[in-house]
Image (cartoon, grey):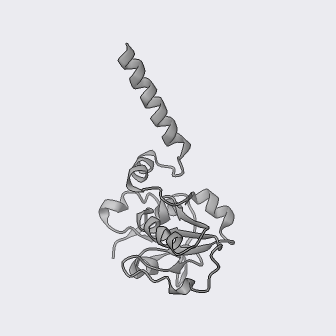
Amino acid sequence: MKKLITLLIFIAINFGAIAQHIQVENTAYQLLLKTLLSHSVPEMSVNELTKKNNTVLLLDAREPKEYQISHLKDAKLVGYEKLDLSSLKNTPKNQPIVVYCSVGYRSEKVAEKLLQQGFINVHNLYGGIFEWKNQNQALVNEKGITDEVHAYDKTWGIWLKKGKKVYK
């Protein structure tokens, strides 16, 4: 009986910890993000970002081909493999910045670098552009609003539930 009570307490504590941090709509996606990310930088939910979208600098940490398919409105491409932060040289260190990628892994690494460079108000978009689209938020490309999202590859694309998946 003690083992059962201990197990139930363990489950309740861990479930509570997960539930307190739920920022994406899909529970399985939430569990993936909980283990995939190191949570080394402050995270911002899609809902929080929609309330601040006009006051933050958005940085896209994906590759150019992903950015060309779609991105958040007014986001600057900084990349990941060939990270280019030169466009930030005149940016105040206290500028609110939100970095995103497909799911949040690459953007977390870029956000860590920004913090190392002295930026003090940096956040990772929790769940990335996939969660942004999953919550019916608008994306753009050079032609205007689009429903297309670069889904990275078929393995990661399973987390994109809305929009038109593009793999090119």
Q: Is residue 130 left or right of residue 94?
A: left
Count of residue discs: 0
Residue placed most toward the observer, 21 or 64: 21
How far across and how far down the image is residue 66, in percent? Answer: 41, 76
Quarter of the image with the C terminus in it: bottom left
How far across and how far down the image is residue 4, in percent? Answer: 38, 19
Q: Residue at x 65, y 79 (%)?
A: 92
How far across and how far down the image is residue 59, in percent? Answer: 53, 75
Residue placed most toward the observer, 90 or 31: 90
Q: Quadrant of residue 165?
A: bottom left
Q: Residue at x 52, y 75 (%)?
A: 117
Q: Residue at x 42, y 19 (%)?
A: 5
How far across and how far down the image is residue 136, in percent? Answer: 56, 61
Q: Residue at x 40, y 78 (%)?
A: 63
Q: Quadrant of residue 122?
A: bottom right
Q: Is residue 116 left or right of residue 65?
A: right
Q: Is residue 15 left or right of residue 89?
A: left
Residue placed most toward the observer, 131 or 1: 1
Q: Quadrant of residue 74?
A: bottom right
Quarter of the image with the N terminus in it: top left
